[in-house]
Amino acid sequence: MRLLLILLTFMIFPGLSGCGKKEAEILLEEEQKESSEKVTEILETEKEPEPEITQPPQDIFVDICGAVTKPGVYRMPPDSRVYEAVEAAGGLLPEAAGNRVNQAQPLSDGQQIYVPTKEEAEKAGAVPAEGAFPEIKAGENSPVSENGKVNLNTADAAALQTLSGIGESKAQAILAYREEHGGFSSIEELMDVPGIKENTFLKIKEKIAVE
């Protein structure tokens, strides 16, 4: 309505000049600007919100080794269990001590699953610990200390592999270091072993001892 009145003013008073004409032109420009802004606002309110894009869960990678047909690193769905990783690795070997691995345990990215042989399991004991090897009673030359921790100076490869992040290769590296240096003087010395970094040490420091 306001725009119509301004246009009529120009039509009725074609000779309008000076301040009056300038004021009418300013009013006309403001009215056009307001109309344009209203149209833009209406168009924006009518826009449909863009749908949110959700990323699918990422696959995980696990290292399965020991007494399986095809040891190696396997790509698994994020909700997989240990038994599925065992199947991906071709299943257990005849000499595998499958009951020493918690095959119902959920997998996590970067996890290593070690399946011991029956011979290794017999040396380690009888009760599984954290889905790997059993806890062994402490005693003279025992792989565990009096407080139940793994003794770095007496543990064999099987006992060392009960520790999180310690696989077959790292266990052998620990044994080689111990033989070369005559044993460990502190648990922190474990970080001097090739392949064992601070992150691994921090995960297991509460479960190891030096005696």
Image (cartoon, grey):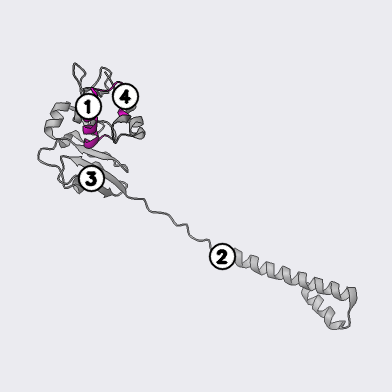
State the separation of the CA atoms marked 4 and 3. Answer: 32 Å
Say whether disc 4 or disc 3 marks the residue closer to the N-terminus: 3
Residue name at image x 82 percent, y 80 percent = 8
State the separation of the CA atoms marked 1 and 4. Answer: 16 Å
Q: Nearer the viewer, mark 2 or mark 4?
A: 4
Residue 207 located left or right of residue 37: left
Image height check: is 177 above or below 51?
A: above
Depth order, front residue of 156/129: 156
Say whether disc 1 or disc 2 marks the residue closer to the N-terminus: 2
Give the label on residue 187, or none: 4
Count of numbered badges drawn on the protein: 4
Which corner quadrant holds the C terminus? Answer: top left
Give the label on residue 180, or none: 1
- Count residues near mark 4 (Cα–Cα under 10 Å), then give few for <14, some for 14-19, many for 20+: some
* Magenta span contains residue 173: yes
Say whether disc 1 or disc 4 marks the residue closer to the N-terminus: 1
Q: Quadrant of residue 94?
A: top left
Image height check: is 162 above or below 209?
A: below
Residue 100 image offset from top left, x and y in percent: 18, 33
Give the label on residue 85, or none: 3
Q: Are marks 4 and 3 in contact (CB under 8 Å)?
A: no
Residue beneath disc 2: 47
Q: Nearer the viewer, mark 4 or mark 3?
A: 4
Q: Quadrant of residue 146?
A: top left
Give the magenta range: 166-190
